[in-house]
Amino acid sequence: MISNLEYYKVFYYVGKLGSLTHAAEELSISQPAVSQALKQLEDTLGTKLFVRASRGIRLTPEGESLYFYVKRGYEEIELGEKKLKKIMNLESGELRIGASDMTLQFYLLPYLEKYHEKYPHIKVTVTNAPTPETLQFLKEGRIDFGVVSTPFAESKELSVLEVKEIEDCFVAGRKFIQYKNRMLDFQELEKLPIISLEQNTSTRSYMDEFLKKNGVEMHPEFELATSDMIVQFTKRNLGIGSVMKEFAKEELESGRLFELRFNKIIPKRHICVVTETKTGVSRAASELLSML
């Protein structure tokens, strides 16, 4: 393999244009420099690559054989540069995000809308999963970053930015109207049918841990995959819903559901944007992160 790839660049343009003069103009170098580069290449390869013709020069049979491969390789490099330029200008590329139903609906979605309006040619893939799975996808390099909710196990490999405060609550429908406006103790939850998320979510882990610290063991009657379904089950009076407050906001404002009040406050937690510290993010991901 020739050590100086510039010789091949000169060879490509001379073969393409059939003229030392035109190649020199295209490369913005002198004609003697073109001639010298071709001589160096021929000496290294041990064969003649061009012969003089009535108009300019033409490739020898050996030169044609070499040009077939050099042309293909050089034009692939040019295509690669054009593709990279589009990616850097956000005219092309892919953005891979991991998010839960909650973080997507109550934080990320408006930003994705603005991002898509600004960069319509970027392919956006959102992997919808609970926080533990999203963090695993991030470690495996399957997503560029995750938008998750606390609590989760932090580590040196993760860069965490808190972006929004969130509040958990218990809500109920008319069947449980006797609990409305009463100041309750958390122990009373043990007597009630609870509707909650499945155990592989940060929201469920947070509530279980909080109640455990207050001497309460929660054994839900229904364990559901999404918070939206918790609200639907609660509206049908199937139990007391344990849910992030914003999911039930519309029902609480309309009076279809009411929030249970307790003699202790449930601490607020956060939605966070999480990236890997050891690996860089794509140009497309970097632009959305700057918006966040």
Image (cartoon, rainbow, N blue to C red):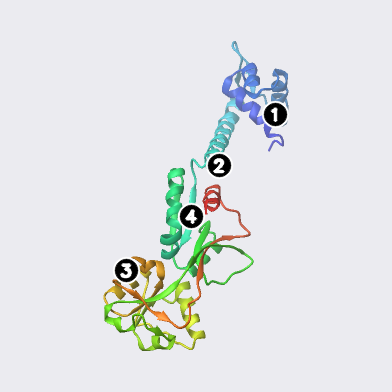
Q: Residues within 10 Å of mark 1 (few under 14, many from 20)?
A: many
> Badges 4 and 1: C-beta atoms under 8 Å apart?
no
| Residue tagged 4 | 96
Q: Secondary structure at mark 3?
A: helix
| Residue tagged 1 | 41
| Residue tagged 3 | 251
Q: Amino acid at mark 3?
A: Glu
Residue 219 appears in view: no
- CA distance separating discs 2 and 1: 35 Å
- CA distance separating discs 4 and 1: 45 Å
> Badges 2 and 1: C-beta atoms under 8 Å apart?
no
Q: Nearer the viewer, mark 4 or mark 3?
A: 3
Looking at the image, tell me whether mark 4 or mark 2 is earlier in sequence order: 2
Looking at the image, tell me whether mark 2 or mark 3 is earlier in sequence order: 2
- CA distance separating discs 4 and 3: 33 Å
Residue 48 appears in view: yes
- CA distance separating discs 2 and 3: 45 Å
Q: Amino acid at mark 4?
A: Arg
Q: Secondary structure at mark 4?
A: strand
Q: Secondary structure at mark 2?
A: helix
Q: Amino acid at mark 2?
A: Met
Q: Quadrant of residue 106 in the image? A: bottom left
